[in-house]
Amino acid sequence: MFVAGTALLTQSHSAEEQARALSDLDPARIDSVIVPGGARPGAPPESRAISSWLAKHHGSFSQVCSVCTGAFILASAGLLSGRRVTTHWNWTNELRRRCPEALVGLDPIYIEDGPIWTPAGVSAGIDMTLALIARDQGRHVAMAVARSLVVYMTRSGGQAQFSAPLEAQGGADTVFGELNGWILENLSERLDLEGLAARAGMSERTFRRRYREITGRSPMQAVDLFRVEAASQALVSGSRSIKQIARQVGCASESNLLHLFRRHYGVTPSEFRARFTPKNTSAAVRG
């Protein structure tokens, strides 16, 4: 069911839908609310009406979800304070600015924190919705929906919004684009702050400060992220042992790789491989 501040005819590229007015709804009969976003997080009168309605009635619902920049409407309703949330990566800093009480994550596809569900972009909203279906109706129903949509039924909220290597390579024209490319090609080497600063032609202090200013991460956080993503790709695309993969991406031991995976994905390398290898996901992508 579509709702809006007032009853109106909503038109998309493929269909028209008559939206019901918020005033016509009985909150006690609503289980879940999903608030979609738009091209940018503005504050039109329609958004303010929905925010006010959510602030008043959210306690009646099993869960309140956003999609993409819909998180800003949840924030204006006061629903994100003290919660872990996410939104599209292009708007995470703006969400932090507007809602400093929220713990805004950049990397996850979606985050569930109690009754509040917040996915990253529009496609991440599909992942969130499949997770909701799996929880409420069972995995077999969610997989049937995934097959109908011809999408994967395997992306968990712990996966990243975008590829760190792709992000680094996409910035080849930036100050550190060339350095990031070199790091990606030399993950098995000893990569420390001193050596990276020397390669960038800067003092360690200046390098650390400039790298964080431009990328949003410290140099060593970036190295860890490149390593864990390279390891994740190796886990799902081959049969090498975890020990071999750890050595390949420059981790001193399996335990170091285990620590990285738990920190970035919330699972062990073995669990990641079991969950995301193609042989375990092919059933979900057959049309």
Image (tube, rainbow, N blue to C red):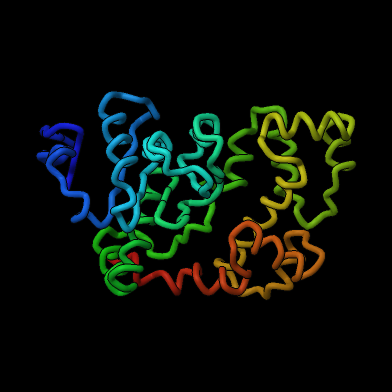
Report how many numbered discs are placed on residues in the image.
0
Question: Is 17 left, or right, of 137 in this rendering?
Answer: left
Q: Residue at x 30, y 54 (%)?
A: 61
Vertical placement of residue 115 versus 209, above or below = below
Q: Nearer the viewer, residue 84 or 215?
A: 84
Q: Residue at x 47, y 53 (%)?
A: 111
Residue 161, position as x, y percentages in the image: 50, 48
Residue 194, position as x, y percentages in the image: 89, 41
Residue 44, position as x, y percentages in the image: 30, 24
**Quarter in which the C terminus is drawn:** bottom left
- In which quarter of the view is residue 202 placed? top right
- In which quarter of the view is residue 4 placed? top left
Residue 49, position as x, y percentages in the image: 26, 31
Q: Nearer the viewer, residue 230 or 159?
A: 159
Question: Is 11 left, or right, of 127 in this rendering?
Answer: left
Q: Nearer the viewer, residue 83 or 95?
A: 83
